[in-house]
Amino acid sequence: MQPDHNDCRGVASILARVGDKWSVFVIMMLGDGPKRFNELKRLVGGISQRMLTLTLRGLERDGLVTRTVFPTIPPRVDYELTDLGRGLSGPVKALGEWAMAHQDQIEDSRMRFDLRNDRQ
């Protein structure tokens, strides 16, 4: 049985969220427990404050992350994976580890491809 086009569109929007590079990094970093915003910003190198905010909001909207505000001065905010997010954490971590393990091979392949196509 093949999925209909409506199923594909729905799945595509989910894959766009969980396949986004910043979402992958955030999910990986939250895999071992809750983190504060600035801790996540430090752990996810290269992400801007605005992009981290947008990523966390998107993940929260999709039910993958919860945001908890503690009534302290100044307020403390923790982000944590939900049960749904923890279910995604394993595959995302495996994907991230695969990417790190094969980074050199992929870069070599890209260089060879680019060299071949530059000569044409």
Image (cartoon, rainbow, N blue to C red):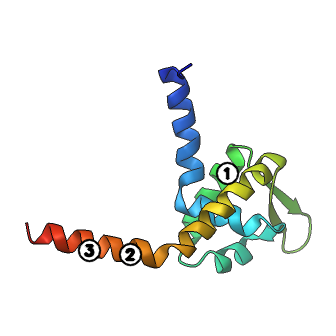
On screen, residue 16 versus residue 28, left or right, reads left
Looking at the image, which is closer to me, 71 or 99?
A: 99
Is any atom of residue 34 visible in this view? yes
Q: Residues within 10 Å of mark 1 (few under 14, many from 20)?
A: many
Label 3: which residue? 112
Dividing the image into 4 quarters, which one contains the C terminus? bottom left
Mark 3 vs mark 1: which is more N-terminal? Answer: 1
On screen, residue 9 versus residue 61, left or right, reads left
* 1 or 2: mark nearer the eye: 2
Please provide percent x and percent y for residue 11. 57, 35
Mark 1 vs mark 2: which is more N-terminal? Answer: 1
Three-letter residue code for mark 2: Glu
Q: Secondary structure at mark 2?
A: helix
Question: Marks 1 and 3: in contact by CB < 8 Å?
Answer: no
Residue 43, placed above or below residue 59:
below
- What residue appears at the point 66 percent right and 58 percent down from the top-left corner? 92
Please provide percent x and percent y for residue 52. 61, 65
Residue farthest toward the right in the current orientation of the protein: 71
Residue 26, placed above or below residue 60:
below
Three-letter residue code for mark 3: Arg
Please provide percent x and percent y for residue 53. 62, 62
- What residue appears at the point 47 percent right and 22 percent down from the top-left corner? 5
* 3 or 1: mark nearer the eye: 3
Q: CA distance from mark 3 to mark 1?
A: 37 Å
Q: Secondary structure at mark 1?
A: helix
Label 2: which residue? 107
Q: Secondary structure at mark 3?
A: helix
- What residue appears at the point 59 percent right and 57 percent down from the top-left corner? 54
- What residue appears at the point 70 percent right and 73 percent down from the top-left corner? 40
Residue farthest toward the left in the current orientation of the protein: 120
Dividing the image into 4 quarters, which one contains the N terminus? top right
Label 1: which residue? 59
